[in-house]
Image: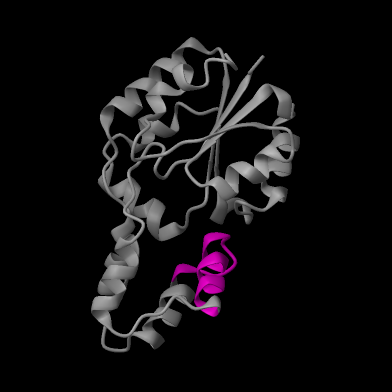
Amino acid sequence: MIKNIIFDFGDVFINLDKTATYREFSKLGDFRLSFNLQELNNHYETGEISTNEFLEQYQKMFPNASRQQLIEAWNAILLDFPKHRLNFLQNLSSKQNFKLILLSNTNELHINWVKENISFYEAFKSCFDTFYLSHEIHLRKPNSNIFEFVLERQQIRPDQTIFVDDTKENTDSAARLGIHTWNNDPKTEDITNLFTIKSDLF
């Protein structure tokens, strides 16, 4: 029996354009997503470097770009948050049948954008029993230690838990620990269909 639901944020609740950041940075100059740059992004996502340090590194790559241009390019990935998904979550939360956990790879700039642009962010956040953001807990998906952290911290069993994420690498990692998973396709599936699509678990 499922007692716990762990949700991703991006492309589960808030829509993303995953090519937008690359596209916007390319407008500012020659942009290549090298291994070192990906490592920088990962360090920022796990809170190992500050927003200022992160932007300073990007400023070196785009010396003619303003700080605001860099921030806007970085945040371009973030789109809209359909209200029907909030309604689904609020209804689910009100029934109190499950422990609800958010587990998101995110960073300070992205979450600040969400707070400023999604009017119901606090209402969304209040639906969860626990709200884990990678830059705050210094762990990120798909590393197994982030799932081990959640299981241990929340004192929950993997066989009583389902994890929903749009990235297969992340759900594969969770599944290896015995957690039930739904690797949702944001193009064709919606979180509001969770109990239909995964009816065998509920």
Query: Which quadrant would residue 14 be assigned to in this image?
Result: top left
The colour scheme used to paint the residues is one colour
Name the residue located 26 percent from the left edge and 80 percent from the top edge. Answer: 28
Q: Is the residue 188 above or below the residue 28 in the image?
A: above
Name the residue located 34 percent from the left edge and 69 percent from the top edge. Answer: 22
Q: In this view, does 164 lie to the left or right of 121?
A: right
| The N terminus, quarter of image | top right
Name the residue located 33 percent from the left edge and 65 percent from the top edge. Answer: 21
Q: Check if residue 59 falls in the magenta segment.
A: no
Query: Which quadrant would residue 35 be assigned to in this image?
Result: bottom right
- Between 172 and 73, the one lying in front of the other is 172
Q: Is the residue 63 above or below the residue 90 in the image?
A: below
Name the residue located 37 percent from the left edge and 35 percent from the top edge. Answer: 122
Asked whether the viewer can see residue 96, the reply is yes
Q: Where is residue 17 in the image (x, y as percent from the top left)?
A: 31, 54
- Between 35 and 76, the one lying in front of the other is 35
| The C terminus, quarter of image | top right
Q: Position of residue 15 (x, y in %)?
A: 32, 44
Please name the predominant secondary structure of the magenta segment in the image: helix
Q: Is the residue 159 above or below the residue 38 in the image?
A: above
Total numbered labels placed on residues in the image = 0
Q: Where is residue 164 in the image (x, y as percent from the top left)?
A: 52, 34
Give the residues drawn in magenta, as a range: 36-51
Q: In this view, does 110 lie to the left or right of 48?
A: left
